[in-house]
Image (spheres, rainbow, N blue to C red):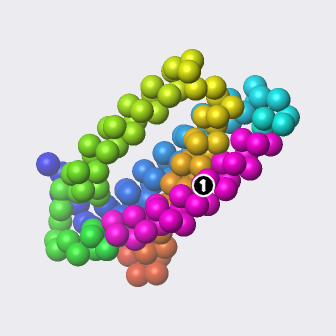
Protein backbone atom coordinates (compact mmCIF):
# COMPACT_ATOMS: atom_id res chain seq x y z
CA UNK A 1 0.00 0.00 0.00
CA UNK A 2 1.39 3.41 -0.92
CA UNK A 3 1.82 5.67 2.10
CA UNK A 4 1.54 9.45 1.85
CA UNK A 5 1.47 12.59 3.99
CA UNK A 6 -1.94 13.51 5.43
CA UNK A 7 -1.96 16.71 3.36
CA UNK A 8 -1.96 14.55 0.22
CA UNK A 9 -5.04 12.77 1.57
CA UNK A 10 -6.82 16.08 2.16
CA UNK A 11 -5.87 17.32 -1.31
CA UNK A 12 -6.95 14.00 -2.85
CA UNK A 13 -10.33 14.23 -1.12
CA UNK A 14 -10.85 17.76 -2.40
CA UNK A 15 -9.91 16.80 -5.94
CA UNK A 16 -12.17 13.73 -5.86
CA UNK A 17 -15.15 15.71 -4.56
CA UNK A 18 -14.59 18.47 -7.13
CA UNK A 19 -14.16 15.95 -9.93
CA UNK A 20 -17.30 13.99 -9.11
CA UNK A 21 -19.26 17.24 -8.77
CA UNK A 22 -18.12 18.39 -12.20
CA UNK A 23 -18.82 14.94 -13.68
CA UNK A 24 -22.39 14.86 -12.33
CA UNK A 25 -23.11 18.36 -13.61
CA UNK A 26 -21.71 17.48 -17.03
CA UNK A 27 -24.14 14.56 -17.21
CA UNK A 28 -27.00 16.85 -16.18
CA UNK A 29 -25.96 19.38 -18.85
CA UNK A 30 -26.20 16.70 -21.56
CA UNK A 31 -29.81 16.06 -20.52
CA UNK A 32 -30.76 19.70 -19.99
CA UNK A 33 -29.91 20.73 -23.54
CA UNK A 34 -32.56 18.25 -24.72
CA UNK A 35 -35.32 19.64 -22.48
CA UNK A 36 -37.89 22.31 -23.22
CA UNK A 37 -37.30 25.82 -21.88
CA UNK A 38 -39.73 25.34 -18.97
CA UNK A 39 -38.21 21.98 -18.07
CA UNK A 40 -34.71 23.48 -18.26
CA UNK A 41 -35.63 26.38 -15.97
CA UNK A 42 -37.25 23.96 -13.51
CA UNK A 43 -34.27 21.59 -13.58
CA UNK A 44 -31.72 24.35 -13.00
CA UNK A 45 -33.63 26.13 -10.23
CA UNK A 46 -34.55 22.87 -8.48
CA UNK A 47 -30.97 21.63 -8.82
CA UNK A 48 -29.52 24.85 -7.38
CA UNK A 49 -31.93 24.79 -4.43
CA UNK A 50 -31.32 21.09 -3.81
CA UNK A 51 -27.55 21.54 -4.13
CA UNK A 52 -27.53 24.44 -1.68
CA UNK A 53 -29.52 22.43 0.86
CA UNK A 54 -27.37 19.31 0.48
CA UNK A 55 -24.16 21.33 0.79
CA UNK A 56 -25.36 23.27 3.82
CA UNK A 57 -27.03 20.44 5.73
CA UNK A 58 -24.87 17.51 4.61
CA UNK A 59 -21.69 17.62 2.61
CA UNK A 60 -20.06 20.65 4.23
CA UNK A 61 -20.27 18.96 7.63
CA UNK A 62 -19.09 15.67 6.19
CA UNK A 63 -16.12 17.37 4.55
CA UNK A 64 -15.22 19.05 7.84
CA UNK A 65 -15.40 15.67 9.64
CA UNK A 66 -13.16 14.12 6.98
CA UNK A 67 -10.62 16.93 7.26
CA UNK A 68 -10.56 16.59 11.06
CA UNK A 69 -10.23 12.80 10.84
CA UNK A 70 -7.40 12.97 8.32
CA UNK A 71 -5.65 15.77 10.20
CA UNK A 72 -5.37 13.55 13.28
CA UNK A 73 -3.20 11.01 11.44
CA UNK A 74 0.43 10.91 12.48
CA UNK A 75 3.18 10.27 9.95
CA UNK A 76 2.51 8.72 6.59
CA UNK A 77 -0.73 6.84 6.02
CA UNK A 78 -2.18 4.55 3.38
CA UNK A 79 -3.26 6.56 0.33
CA UNK A 80 -6.76 5.01 0.42
CA UNK A 81 -7.35 6.42 3.93
CA UNK A 82 -8.65 9.67 2.42
CA UNK A 83 -12.08 8.08 3.00
CA UNK A 84 -13.15 5.81 5.86
CA UNK A 85 -13.43 2.20 4.71
CA UNK A 86 -17.18 2.23 5.39
CA UNK A 87 -17.55 5.16 3.00
CA UNK A 88 -16.28 3.00 0.14
CA UNK A 89 -19.35 0.76 0.57
CA UNK A 90 -21.59 3.83 0.36
CA UNK A 91 -19.70 5.06 -2.73
CA UNK A 92 -20.21 1.72 -4.49
CA UNK A 93 -23.93 1.80 -3.64
CA UNK A 94 -24.33 5.41 -4.83
CA UNK A 95 -22.47 4.72 -8.08
CA UNK A 96 -24.61 1.64 -8.73
CA UNK A 97 -27.77 3.59 -8.00
CA UNK A 98 -26.64 6.40 -10.31
CA UNK A 99 -25.88 3.99 -13.15
CA UNK A 100 -29.27 2.35 -12.69
CA UNK A 101 -31.11 5.70 -12.61
CA UNK A 102 -29.30 6.95 -15.72
CA UNK A 103 -30.04 3.81 -17.69
CA UNK A 104 -33.62 3.06 -16.69
CA UNK A 105 -36.43 4.46 -18.82
CA UNK A 106 -38.55 4.69 -15.65
CA UNK A 107 -36.97 7.98 -14.53
CA UNK A 108 -37.22 10.83 -17.04
CA UNK A 109 -34.15 13.02 -17.45
CA UNK A 110 -36.38 15.98 -16.62
CA UNK A 111 -36.54 14.66 -13.03
CA UNK A 112 -33.05 13.19 -12.91
CA UNK A 113 -31.19 16.33 -13.98
CA UNK A 114 -32.07 18.40 -10.86
CA UNK A 115 -30.86 15.53 -8.66
CA UNK A 116 -27.56 15.37 -10.53
CA UNK A 117 -27.19 19.15 -10.46
CA UNK A 118 -27.95 19.19 -6.75
CA UNK A 119 -25.57 16.44 -5.73
CA UNK A 120 -22.89 17.64 -8.16
CA UNK A 121 -23.11 21.24 -6.98
CA UNK A 122 -23.04 20.27 -3.31
CA UNK A 123 -20.00 18.02 -3.79
CA UNK A 124 -18.19 20.74 -5.72
CA UNK A 125 -18.98 23.42 -3.12
CA UNK A 126 -18.05 21.16 -0.20
CA UNK A 127 -14.75 20.24 -1.86
CA UNK A 128 -13.53 23.74 -1.06
CA UNK A 129 -13.55 22.80 2.64
CA UNK A 130 -10.52 20.61 1.89
CA UNK A 131 -8.71 23.30 -0.11
CA UNK A 132 -9.51 25.95 2.49
CA UNK A 133 -8.00 23.81 5.25
CA UNK A 134 -4.80 23.34 3.26
CA UNK A 135 -4.61 27.03 2.43
CA UNK A 136 -5.33 28.26 5.99
CA UNK A 137 -2.70 25.98 7.48
CA UNK A 138 -0.11 26.59 4.81
CA UNK A 139 -0.28 22.85 4.26
CA UNK A 140 -0.43 23.25 0.50
CA UNK A 141 3.34 23.83 0.63
CA UNK A 142 3.82 20.31 1.97
CA UNK A 143 1.23 18.54 -0.14
At 85% from the left and 34% from the top, the residue drawn is: 37
> Could you say which is closer to the camera, residue 14 or residue 143?
14
Which residue is under mark 1?
51
In this picture, residue 122 sits left or right of residue 110: left
Instruction: Answer whether residue 25 is magenta in the image.
Output: no
Residue 137 visible? The answer is yes
Q: Residue furthest front?
A: 106
78 over 139 or under it: above or below: above
Magenta stretch: give its range: 41-66
Q: Residue furthest left?
A: 1
At 42% from the left and 33% from the top, the residue drawn is: 97
| Rendered-image quadrant of the C terminus | bottom left
- Image location (x, y in percent) of residue 5: 25, 66
At 23% from the left and 60% from the top, the residue drawn is: 4
At 46% from the left and 53% from the top, the residue drawn is: 17
Q: Residue furthest bottom?
A: 137
- Image location (x, y in percent) of residue 89: 26, 43
- Examine the image and state in which quarter residue 62 appears: bottom left
Amino acid sequence: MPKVNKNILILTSGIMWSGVGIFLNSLAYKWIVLLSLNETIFAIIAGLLLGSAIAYFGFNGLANKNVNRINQYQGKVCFWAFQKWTTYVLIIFMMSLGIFMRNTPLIPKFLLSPIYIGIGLSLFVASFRYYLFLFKNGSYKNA
